[in-house]
Image (spheres, grey):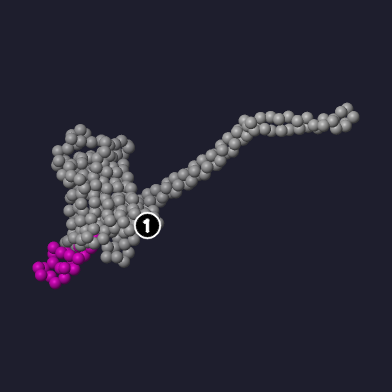
Amino acid sequence: MLGGISWQSIADDDGVNMGFRTSVRDIADRKRMEQQIRNYNENMEQLVQERTARLMELEERQAKVERLAALGQLAAGVAHEINNPLAGLRNAIELVRDSLPAGFADADLLGMVQSEIDRIGGIVRQLYQLHRPQPVSDRCVDLTNVTLQTIQLLSAACRRHRVTIQVQGNERQPVLARLPDGELKQVLYNILLNAVQASPEGGQIDVMIAARDREVVIGVTDHGMGIPADILRKIFDPFFTTKHGTLETGMGLGLSVSQSLVQALGGHIEVHSVVGRRTTFTVTLPRGWVASDGAISLPESACDAGNGKGEL
Ligand code: ADP
């Protein structure tokens, strides 16, 4: 029993003190309730703190999404403005080139101008894609095939860095999905190129491709320098790059473009990095792409069955 004692003095009619009246009560219930109220208040405070932190995080994320969308829109607008005169330049140079007399001494210079125009064209295309493009096709593709083709595109870079790319598991096993292969190739190319550039000489990059019920997952792990936390926060920002003054200068667009493309397809990219040891980029996509009304067009049974060729 938890006791509570109270007393009152007793006086006679003349006001002479006659002693005290005491009473003893069991106050365990009251103490329990007080403790419950204290606990409840503490929980409430913790809950409010957690909710406030979550709200701030969501607001921050929303502000970032809006900032990136505005930046993407701006970039796409600039790209549009650059694209038109660029097309004119490309045509003009071709006409000049065609009209040159055979053996013209400075023909090489024109070739150089042409290839630089193509390079600007490539950058402009990337800028365009920052603005959440809608996928243009939804053919049934084999991700294993698409991955192998992309690895092929990187063979020169792999040779230069003395790096190998290994697809884990059964290379011939088709993983079919209804996704646009052009976009897929570009995303994989950007992630794999970063992995090649981050790898030590003689390093191996592991690629994992898997299909779940409604999703496909592609993981790329390099055993390079990893990404410190302060950099990790920024790697998807347009124009963020740490490749200044290195052999491989970067524009800082590869990951932001990849993220735009993957999000437009209804998927997401996750990064897990252990500094000094390895980095894994995981791309998760629905097996069908998301239409403008938000519906996911899942692969038909024919697509699921797989014929090993990747296209139906
Ligand atoms: P860029 O390659 O032109 O720098 P990206 O948007 O592709 O642009 O990448 C942004 C930055 O993310 C890189 O500059 C690099 O710091 C970091 N990064 C991306 N992938 C990796 C990786 N696999 N290992 C280490 N750092 C990486």
Give me the residue at 29% from left, 65% from top.
246
Q: Residue 174, position in %: x, y?
A: 18, 42
Q: Is residue 133 visible?
A: no
Q: Residue 31, position in %: x, y?
A: 63, 34
Count of marks placed on residues: 1
Assign the magenta stretch its main secondary structure: helix
Mark 1, other Cα within 10 Å: few <14 / some 14–19 / many ≥20: few
- Is 135 displayed left or right of 59 in the figure? left
Q: Residue furthest front?
A: 1
Q: Which residues are magenta?
A: 96-122
Give me the residue at 18% from left, 57% from top.
155
Q: Residue 132, position in %: x, y?
A: 32, 47
Q: Is residue 194 above or below residue 16?
A: below
The residue where tag 1 is placed is: 228
Q: Which quadrant would residue 143 be assigned to in this image?
A: top left
Of residues 167 and 108, which is closer to you in this image?
167
